[in-house]
Image: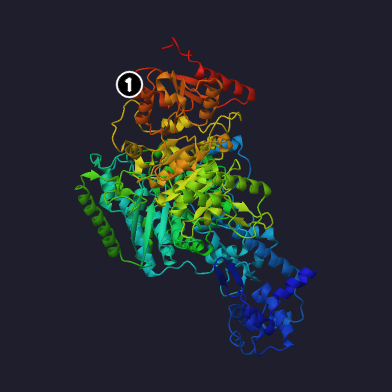
Amino acid sequence: MHRLRTTVARLRPLTAAQTAQSLSQPRTLGVEGGLRTFQPVRRQNTSVAAEPFLNGTSSNYVEEMYYAWLENPRNVHKSWDIFFRNANAGAPPGAAYQTPPPLNGTTQGLTSVQALVGAQPNVEKLVEDHLAVQSLIRAYQVRGHHIAKLDPLDISCVDFDDAPCTVRGHHMAQLDPLGIMAADVKPTPSDITTSHDKLGLYGLAESDLDKVFRLPTTTFIGGNESALPLREIIRRLESAYCQHIGVEFMFINDVEQCQWIRQKFETPGVMQFSLEEKRTLLARMIRSTRFEEFLQRKWSSEKRFGLEGCESLIPALKTIIDKSSQSGVESVIMGMPHRGRLNVLANVIRKDLDQIFCQFDSKLEAADEGSGDVKYHLGMYHKRMNRVSKRDISMSLMANPSHLEAVDPVVQGKTKAEQFYCGDTEGKRVMSILLHGDAAFAGQGIVYETFHLSDLPSYTTHGTIHVVVNNQIGFTTDPRMARSSPYPTDVARVVNAPIFHVNADDPEAVMYVCNVAAEWRNTFHKDVVVDLVCYRRNGHNEMDEPMFTQPLMYKQIKKQKGVLQKFAEKVIAEGVITMQDYEEEVARYDKICEEAYTRSKDEKILHIKHWLDSPWPDFFTLEGQPKSMNCPSTGISEEELSHIGKIASSVPVEDFTIHGGLSRILKGRANMVSQRVCDWALGEYMAFGSLLKEGIHIRLSGQDVERGTFSHRHHVLHDQNVDKRICIPMNHISPNQAPYTVCNSSLSEYGVLGFELGFAMASPNALVVWEAQFGDFHNTAQCIIDQFISSGQAKWVRQNGIVLLLPHGMEGMGPEHSSARPERFLQMCNDDPDVFPKLSEDFAMRQLYDCNWIVVNCSTPANYYHVLRRQILQPFRKPLIVFTPKSLLRHPEAKSSFDDMLPGTHFKRIIPDDGPAAANPEKVKRILLCSGKIYYELTRERNNRGMDDTVAVVRVEQLSPFPFDLVKAETERYPNADLVWCQEEHKNQGYYDYVKPRIRTTINHSQPVWYAGREPAAAPATGNKQTHLTELQRLLDTAFDLEAFSGKA
Ligand SMILES: Cc1ncc(C[n+]2csc(CCOP(=O)(O)OP(=O)(O)O)c2C)c(N)n1
Ligand SMILES: [Mg+2]
């Protein structure tokens, strides 16, 4: 009862005092970066209460009139009707009242008013009805999109049915995938009042349609009016939510964000465009459409994955870019799949048309080294003036592999890097746009992984605009078979991104939602999705026959008028443009294409370089070559080593309490520094610290990297008394140092590695490091490794210096966590096993320059330190794969002296034996070549067996590119020795298959290369500790049995 009374009170007109108060306190919305103010929604009461002809005694009467009017405007005299309507519309005091008609005998109106006087309105019913109307409004806000006319073909296959997929359902879907036969595939939600009989659900009747209802504050359909007849309420809701735009947003937890969206879509008349805007839209549609038609005319038998059926993608993107540029965005980084890519390059990025057209000439020779790539994978960078905002904007479209959605995290990483380098902490200057296909968006897990980066402090790009080309098909598979969610966009709901579905055959609606999407991103800095519901006019590509698999859909498509034609007819009919203007505009663009086509024939050579998405202008010479072929010493001075060592063993802020265990670790470090030695963690510290001091930004990202999975790193210290208070000593090395970013990542490999790869693309002057928790987990990022890291430069002439740290080693921990799968990385190296290379002064550098990536397994902290520093000091960039140790992190022998890190020292590609064997090489009977941690097991065993002078142990630290020159020197040093490759990994794994042919080439096949190691196996390691130890002993026995291979040649 209390609630009822309060509700009624809210329906009553306010007093003047209340009104004044409510007006002086506009509702404010807290938004990041400032406060925004909404106009007060209720204004009707102001004028009612302040009417000059009202006084205390008449107010009861007015209230009764008002209730009666609310029930049905016809219940009151026309004059009261006009008065309440005017008051609702916000008429100022005095203006709402209009004199009633004179009393001249026709007293009908007056009689009905008089009849009401004294009658008590049914308050309870009134409240119920109002609540019902509120529910109804909410139903439209939540589910209006279910019945929006989103599908240009009108055969929508969105399945809102929550029932499980049954056998019948399956058959039904097979027979009628698009729901053409099954009318009930897309049932109207029961709470959406598409017909008046549904009003019953709310306890309303058709007779209520003309009753006026006060609107709740959660709707903007009233515009300036705060009460509307039910009929009008429904009409306005349908117009806001059920036409060509379907808005999904009611899952958003933030009320202000919901209000913002409601205001954007509900406010009457909100979707109106000026003549100028309509003309620009038409011009963009012409370019988009005629570009594809031109390509089709000239190269009818070439695959290009045309945009036909979704031509409005081009104005969509341009609208987003215009709007964002107007709000201050200076750089847009885009990622997209095949569909419409050439069109985007031509009409959004504005790549020269002749450059695009010459890609179709199969006779052109490539000017660049490497494989190159097909035209619909290449990237592009371009800076130009945005005509709408009159500001410069640079745009890059990232090159990408065929693997759909793989580029998503890469785009995000590059965006983050650009934001970082220009100090754009809120994403106001740099933003990303990701395009998706409907099937890929729903199907690829990387989409989800990328969404989960969107709100993490070290990974957020402050909002991405996603645009889905939802042509309702993926190759030959229709949505019913391709996803279990109603929309392809449902994945975006995990981050509460609003989703704007729009019928792509309505370019104005498309333009409207794109404007709102850009404003949303600019206001809230959160992701948003634009779902362009369209169709694919041709097959998957231009050579493909879609009628084999989608006959009914394609019958419909064949009947479908092109969107440009429909839109042109509309705007010509509206008088926006004449037929003649339209035809001239079309002819003008066709001429541009023809002229570019003629020019393209003059191109004699294909330059993939012209398709670079991330140029590094000052890093190379003007010809794009490295500025030298030298790498200076990677050592640093004694003072620097001890200074960085001190930072690494201290807490460089006041009043900061660290954990007791950590104090001991830091003390241990301090001891090492005083003894001039480094363990693994300290070696890493020296490399990072010195590079930071030299102005190189370092970013270390991955799961639990801040502490280090093995608790050895501790780059972030946590105050034991103050929650969330942290200290990063690495940022206290020097006042002018570059910043150090170290960040625990989400539990994703594919997403995070892709992100870091993208980050590393933005600048050559940063060391970007991704660490896997254990090396084997890299396999869930395999796509990034295969498609980008190993082959990216060959395909897209784009270098990348990313570093992968992959903990590796057989420690008896079972099949998982043991192997970082070196064999996989080595198999993808591009050096020739069968050709001994030409040796020259700068051989080591040339070899690095020519390789696709560098693979190392360092056995000492000093060598790890050098290889990290070399990564930056070498005059070009290559990915670096490092197999990192686990037990060696604390191994007493795995320490390096400062002497090995001083100026003049370098990374050692090979570490020769430097003991008794090397002193007397003639006596040596066996060379054991190995890599990584097994070295320590071999030397211990050699020592135990007293064989220090008969067996030389040589460490191959850089596996690839293979140090042919140094292996040659080492094998020649011991003239009487046989050659054994020893590894702890199984024979079909590890390094053996890679090194064997290369060693054989090095020694000119003069002697066998024997193997000492574990037998071939399916799993990387045994799960049984005892078996592990037995296997280890067996391989050591073989390695030191000088007779093991006799007679086997
Ligand atoms: C990861 C991955 N798997 C499979 C393919 C092969 N493939 C290329 S296009 C395509 C269909 C894509 O459908 P959709 O995402 O809806 O884009 P559309 O072609 O309809 O624009 C498939 C399966 C691929 N390119 N990438
Ligand atoms: Mg598709």
Whether residue 555 can be seen here: no
Query: For the residue marked with disc 1, what is the amino acid?
Result: Asn
Q: Quadrant of the C terminus?
A: top left
Residue that lies at the very extreme toward the left in this rendered image:
602
Q: Is residue 762 left or right of residue 820?
A: left
Give percent across and percent down for residue 679: 54, 41
Give percent across and percent down for residue 456: 56, 53
Which residue corresponds to mark 1? 1004
Whether residue 627 can be seen here: yes
Q: Is residue 559 left or right of residue 860?
A: left
In this rendering, the answer to whether 341 lies above or below 526 is: above
Give percent across and percent down for residue 946: 53, 20
Secondary structure category for the residue under label 1: loop
Front residue (pair 710, 473) = 710
Q: Would you identify the image quadrant in which residue 475 lies?
A: top left
Give percent across and percent down for residue 507: 42, 59
Q: Would you identify the image quadrant in which residue 212 lies?
A: bottom right
Q: Would you identify the image quadrant in which residue 890 lies?
A: top right
Front residue (pair 106, 463) = 463
Q: Quadrant of the N terminus?
A: bottom right
Front residue (pair 642, 408) = 642
Badge 1 residue CB within 8 Å of ligand 1: no
Q: Ligand 1: give its quadrant.
A: top left
In this rendering, the answer to whether 6 lies above or below 192 is: below
Q: Residue at x 44, y 66 (%)?
A: 327
In this rendering, the answer to whether 240 lies above or below 89 is: above
